[in-house]
Image (tube, grey):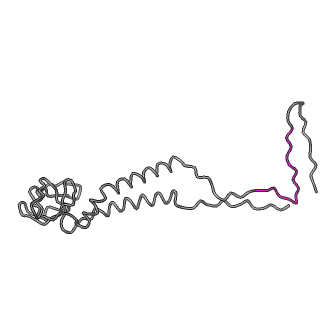
């Protein structure tokens, strides 16, 4: 069964547009959309830039951080000279500043901090073992440091943000259900 086509009234000189004929037996042809086109929003761009900042901060001085984690560097002695403390609400943070001399006496650093030192860990003038890993104003104890954990956390957060934005497959949009007459 077909439906009759009607011709609309037009004025001379205007093009006439007619709709294609449809019958109840044949439904209109629809093409299912299999992937949506990615459209970047301001939120997506902002999160991408934030993830880039996290990568920058996490990867900065990565070689020194890895060397410090394993105490891989020039071994020597640190002589604590001055204790500096900062009071926080309910917490005190202290660090010893002093001089570092390598075991062979070739490297001498003055006014460097010993990472991980505290009020009770050292006494002024008594040398302790330390390692120079190439950090500009800091030496480390022979046990290394845990600074790498914070850097790894920054890089993991950046990876999680980027994966959530770009790593998942696009969702399929289901095709509309076929209509029956």
177 to the left or right of 61: right
Instruction: In the displayed orientation, state which residue is furthest to the bottom.
Output: 143
Q: Which residues are magenta?
A: 16-30
- The residue nearer to you, when weighing 100 against 104, is 104
Q: Residue at point 85% right, 40% down?
A: 17
Q: Quadrant of the C terminus?
A: bottom right
Residue 40's x, y, as percent? 54, 49
Asked if residue 29 lies in the magenta stretch, the reply is yes
Instruction: In the displayed orientation, state which residue is furthest to the left.
Output: 125
122 to the left or right of 34: left
**What is the quadrant of residue 157 in the picture?**
bottom left
Instruction: In the displayed orientation, state which residue is furthest to the top.
Output: 12
Residue 139's x, y, as percent? 18, 60
Asked if residue 48 lies in the magenta stretch, the reply is no
12 to the left or right of 95: right
Q: Total of numbered circles in the picture?
A: 0
Q: Residue at point 17% right, 60% down?
A: 114
Q: Residue at point 50% right, 59% down?
A: 164
Residue 99's x, y, as percent? 10, 57
Q: Quadrant of the N terminus?
A: bottom right
Residue 137's x, y, as percent? 19, 54
Q: Main secondary structure of the magenta part?
A: loop
**What is the quadrant of residue 79 in the picture?**
bottom left
């Amino acid at each position: 069964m077909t439906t009759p086509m009607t011709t609309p009234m037009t004025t001379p000189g205007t093009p006439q547009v007619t709709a294609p004929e449809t019958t109840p037996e044949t439904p209109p042809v629809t093409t299912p959309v299999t992937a949506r086109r990615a459209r970047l929003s301001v939120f997506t761009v902002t999160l991408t830039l934030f993830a880039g900042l996290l990568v920058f901060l996490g990867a900065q001085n990565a070689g020194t951080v890895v060397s410090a984690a394993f105490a891989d560097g020039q071994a020597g002695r640190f002589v604590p000279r001055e204790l500096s403390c900062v009071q926080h609400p309910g917490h005190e943070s202290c660090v010893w500043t002093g001089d570092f001399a390598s075991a062979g006496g070739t490297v001498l650093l003055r006014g460097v901090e010993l990472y991980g030192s505290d009020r009770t860990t050292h006494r002024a003038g008594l040398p302790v073992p330390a390692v120079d890993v190439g950090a500009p104003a800091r030496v480390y104890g022979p046990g290394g440091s845990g600074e790498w954990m914070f850097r790894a956390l920054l890089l993991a957060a950046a990876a999680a943000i980027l994966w959530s934005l770009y790593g998942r497959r696009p969702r399929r949009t289901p095709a509309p259900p076929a209509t029956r007459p």
